[in-house]
Amino acid sequence: MQRKPYVAGNWKMWGTRAQTRAYCPRLLELLPPPPQRRADVALCVPFTALDVCLEAVRGGDVRVLAQNMHQAPEGAHTGEISAPMLTELGVHGVVLGHSERRRDHCETDRALREKLPVALAAGLEPILCVGETEEEREQGETERRLRQQVWEALEDVADERLADVVIAYEPVWAIGTGRTATPEQAQEAIAFIRALVADRSREAAARVRILYGGSVKPENAAEILAQPDVDGALVGGASLDPESFAQIVAAAP
Ligand code: PEP
């Protein structure tokens, strides 16, 4: 099955409204026009820049995603943002379960299990992040950890919606460290995640897009993106520079 590559830039806590206004037109200049683009392109930006980003990429076929969402539609959750608030803005999707949110905000697999169906029901494309820590890898626990994260987060997603989730395999030890997984490590883990999805639905496993994330740069992107099960990249640091990000998009096969 031919899956269209997907390259998403995760700005994390970067991107004032002024920076967003400067960044987006430059990125659109650098990307090939949509009909000639081999990959779907997305920007995952802070809540405060979402509307500016949506306006600045209008017509450019770039998806705009938020970086988190609460599972409740409204209520006593100070500081949180709900799915209806995101859909009202017109965003395409939302990153869920990034390791920095798991680490800094106690995001649990249990909460993700509630968030995924809520996002899908609202028409948002979720990018579900999973990945093992360095300690888990060293102890031979990578597969156990990935199984737990993938199975629990997807438990309440109906089989026929599984392929609407984008999964990002992001080994924690490779995020923001400059230590990229080797193409073989990325392929092995992503093939394992695809097999986990196949345990639920073979059809969904053939269609679901699974990205690699962790210190992807223009220099290493082509080799990683060439792996048969790697359907794209979630790019943090290197996405803050439009030139580097456009080069990574161009590296998609
Ligand atoms: C990320 O934030 O999802 C990420 C992969 O970061 P970096 O590319 O900087 O490692």
Image: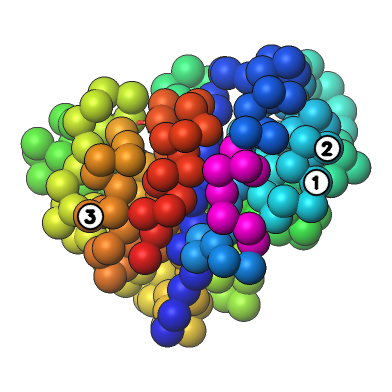
Is the CB atom of the residue marked by disc 3 within 8 angstroms of ligand 1's nearest atom?
Answer: no
Q: Crowding at label 1, few (<14), some or many (≥20) Cα neighbours within 10 Å?
A: few
Q: Crowding at label 3, few (<14), some or many (≥20) Cα neighbours within 10 Å?
A: some
Say which residue appears at 57% left-offset and 18% top-offset.
Answer: 13
Q: Secondary structure at mark 1?
A: loop
Determine which quarter of the picture holds residue 211: bottom left
Magenta stretch in the rendered image: 27-34
Number of callouts: 3
Q: CA distance from mark 3 to mark 2?
A: 34 Å
Q: CA distance from mark 1 to mark 2?
A: 5 Å
- Which badge, 3 or 1, comes first in the chain's sequence? 1
What is the three-letter code of the residue carrying label 2? Glu
Left/right placement of residue 231 relative to residue 195 reads right
Q: Which residue is mark 1?
A: 58
In depth, the one of 179 and 76 nearer the eye is 179
Tag 1 near tag 2, CB within 8 Å: yes
Confirm whether the magenta stretch covers residue 28: yes
What is the three-letter code of the residue carrying label 3? Glu
Give the colour scheme shown: rainbow
Say which residue appears at 52% left-offset and 33% top-offset.
Answer: 242
- Which badge, 3 or 2, comes first in the chain's sequence? 2
Residue 250 can be seen, yes or no: yes
Q: Which residue is mark 2?
A: 55
> Which residue occupies the extreme front position in the image?
29
Q: Crowding at label 2, few (<14), some or many (≥20) Cα neighbours within 10 Å?
A: few
> Which residue occupies the extreme right position in the image?
88
Left/right placement of residue 242 relative to residue 217 reads right
Q: Which residue is mark 3?
A: 223
